[in-house]
Image (tube, rainbow, N blue to C red):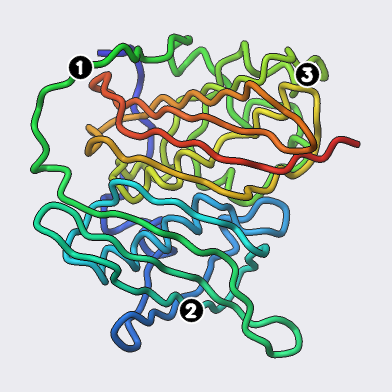
Amino acid sequence: MPEAASASTAVRATIGDSEFDRDTAVTRRAPGVYDLDLSAGWTIISAVNGGYLLAVLGRALADALPHSDPFTISAHYLTASQPGPAVVRTETVRTGRTLSTGQASLFQYDDEGREVERIRVLASYGDLDALPDDVRTSAKPPVFPPLDQCFGPEDGPAPVDGSSAIADRLMLKLDPSTLGWALGAPSGKGEMRSWFGLADGRDADPLSLLLTVDALPPTAFEIGLKGWVPTVELTVHVRARPAPGPLRVSITTRNLAGGFLEEDAEVWDSADRLVAQSRQLARARLV
């Protein structure tokens, strides 16, 4: 069991009754059609975070499909989402005994009243609790200092350039060896590691893991780049229902070419299990 302290909150939020649950809630208007409001609390500068958007679509698909847990979900981000009203439309592609597959798109209106598709996903859902217990893996949990020896946004002398509303809703404690960018001395290694939780103490579940994989500062910062790194495509594999307690997230980038980079993420729970993996392609600003 890793050495870590739980997030200290006066009253811990619970799964189903937290800011994350309220802000990802969708209302079924008709079969396969859901209304929602994208919260400004999950923005990076002025754009809505891609992991939060994925969780919103994931919640709609959990309602539309006969299975409730995302196993794999792939999203293409078409245009930048903004806080405010939105509509999700889902379609069931196939249902089976152990897996069901569906697709979903999120739409908003532009300034001229035209409907614009923001994000489109294809996903397969199942029941994580029905999976066998055997694990055969060469993967190992990331090794970095205990939570109380890592640093978050609140530990800096001033807000980091590009900081955002989403930081107030997260418990982030980054490995000091991946914080060179915050001191003006990026390592050049393209690595980011952090303890992770929600600021109100809500424990992780499969839907919140869709946020977790895209909630750390970009690895591009440690390569020496600055500014927003918008996601083009993101695929998440949820491997297990996470145990209570803080998560550990490790993200790496091995190749930046032509203005695009990949980010590979692993999420480990307090029981040393690999509970989620992801890969995304993102656009990097080179100047």
Quarter the N terminus occupies? top left
Point out the tag, 2 or 1, that comes first from the N-terminus: 2
Residue 168 coordinates in the image, percent (x, y): 56, 46
Circles 2 and 3 in contact, beta carbons < 8 Å: no
Residue denoted by label 3:
183
Residue denoted by label 1:
136
Report the side of 283 relative to 85 (left or right): right
The residue mark sitting in front, 3 or 1, is 1
Report the side of 189 relative to 166 (left or right): right
Distance from label 3 to label 1 (Cα)?
40 Å
Report the side of 122 relative to 53 (left or right): left
Q: Residues within 10 Å of mark 2 (few under 14, many from 20)?
A: many
Q: Amino acid at mark 1?
A: Arg
Q: Amino acid at mark 3?
A: Leu
Task: Please determine whether, in this image, residue 18 is positioned above or below residue 11.
Answer: below
Residue 162 coordinates in the image, percent (x, y): 75, 42
Point out the tag, 3 or 1, that comes first from the N-terminus: 1
Residue denoted by label 2:
87
Q: Residues within 10 Å of mark 1 (few under 14, many from 20)?
A: few
Query: Residue at 23% across / 67% down in the picture?
Result: 65
Query: Residue at 29% across / 68% down in the picture?
Result: 93
Give the structural element (helix, strand or loop) at label 2. Answer: strand
